[in-house]
Image: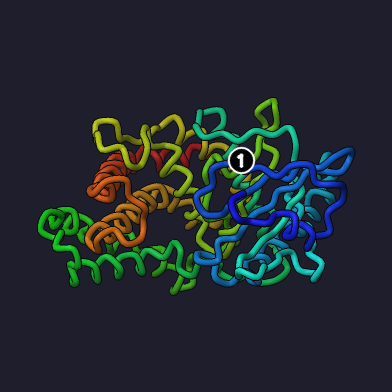
Amino acid sequence: MGNIDTASILAQFEISGKVQEVKPLGNGLINDTYHVITEGDAPDYVLQRINNAIFQDVDLLQHNIEVVTAHIRRKLEADGTDDIDRKVLQFVKARSGKTYYCDEADRYWRVMIYIPDTVTNEAVTPESAYDCGKAFGSFEKMLVDVPEPLGETIPDFHNMELRMRQLREAVQNDAAGRLGEVRDIVDELERDADEMCQGERLYREGRLPKRICHCDTKVNNMLFDQQGRVLCVIDLDTVMPSFIFSDYGDFLRTGANFTAEDDPDLSHVGFNEEIFKAFTTGYLESAREFLTPIEMELLPYAVALFPFMQCVRFLADYINGDTYYKIKYPTHNLDRTRNQLALYRDVRRHDQMMAAFIRGLL
């Protein structure tokens, strides 16, 4: 584990059983995660370092997660759900009484009970897309009546107006002298910017609510059992108030693109109608009873919003000289920009199809 003394960190938490082995777990980009294997009948655990460069208010972060997991557990109990311990995350208290511990090096740690016999998926199929839609819709539905307000763990994370302001600042400064080669992309994004910022306007007008959303709805942020059924939604760091577009649109941005977001061959990029239909069917099965008419009407907008927003973010970073996203080669952010722009264009070609499909489901 490098120079990390996991034994002294684990000693700060109220875990049972003797630790046999600690080994890296998963391939998350934000937090460092370890599988803690214990001897005998004690449960295994997950030890995770919280990236407090990104999540700067760890107390708020963990408070959100504690409120959400406790609320989901109560809902599952009230429904008489079986095997609840496999269907909601459980955090272990530190000896301080909090669900996290800060070590001498100002690193923040938390411990969860490991859920055994589970799999995570990286690829989306129509079958798994339906299950994911149902699970994320159900996750939102359970949190409609959370008993206390939650904070934003990353303020303005999906605020399209802010992302446009950041792009305009990048254009104005042209820090890396790259504006000339991307001026046509900037112009195209500006043409649609007003339409893409309608979410924030509708919210200010009181016509669009914010709800508790997951805000990072990728297929690998849920656990499946060995039979391929969804057990629970994981990776709750970004759970916070947002528009439901954050969960619906962001899943389809990655799940319904025929290729990866940085594929430089734009002939591979396209909107997968089959994944869209499967995810939307599952999502509306769970979510339709709490969604307002305007939220349902704007679902096609949500599908377009997320490739548009990601294109804006990649482009701003490229113009700024690649200061935010990790890159593997000099034009990596430019390739990502063009990829997401191509996806956005293809999504817009499906506007009428999406609206008609959603109307048919309702």
**Left or right: 18, with 31 as reference point:** right
Q: Residue at x 49, y 32 (%)?
A: 123
Give the percent coordinates (x, y) of residue 241. 56, 65
The total number of labels drawn is 1
Q: Position of residue 286 (x, y in %)?
A: 63, 44
Could you classify mark 1 by the number of other residues whose Cα lies within 10 Å: few (under 14), some (14-19), or many (20 or more)?
Answer: many
Colour mode of the rendering: rainbow
Secondary element type, mark 1: helix
**Rendered position, 183 above or below 251:** below
Q: Which residue is mark 1?
A: 134
Query: Where is 64 relative to 111, above or below?
Result: below
- x 44%, y 74%: residue: 204
**Residue 255 in picture, x, y percent from top left:** 45, 38
Q: Position of residue 136 (x, y in %)?
A: 60, 46
Q: Is residue 262 above or below residue 49?
A: above
Q: Kindly tell me whether residue 208 is visible in this rendering.
A: yes
User: In the displayed image of the protein, which residue is found farthest to the left?
Assistant: 180
Amino acid carrying mark 1 in the image: Lys
Name the foreground residue: 84 vs 116.
116
* Picture quadrant of residue 161: bottom left
**Residue 232 placement, left or right of 303:** right
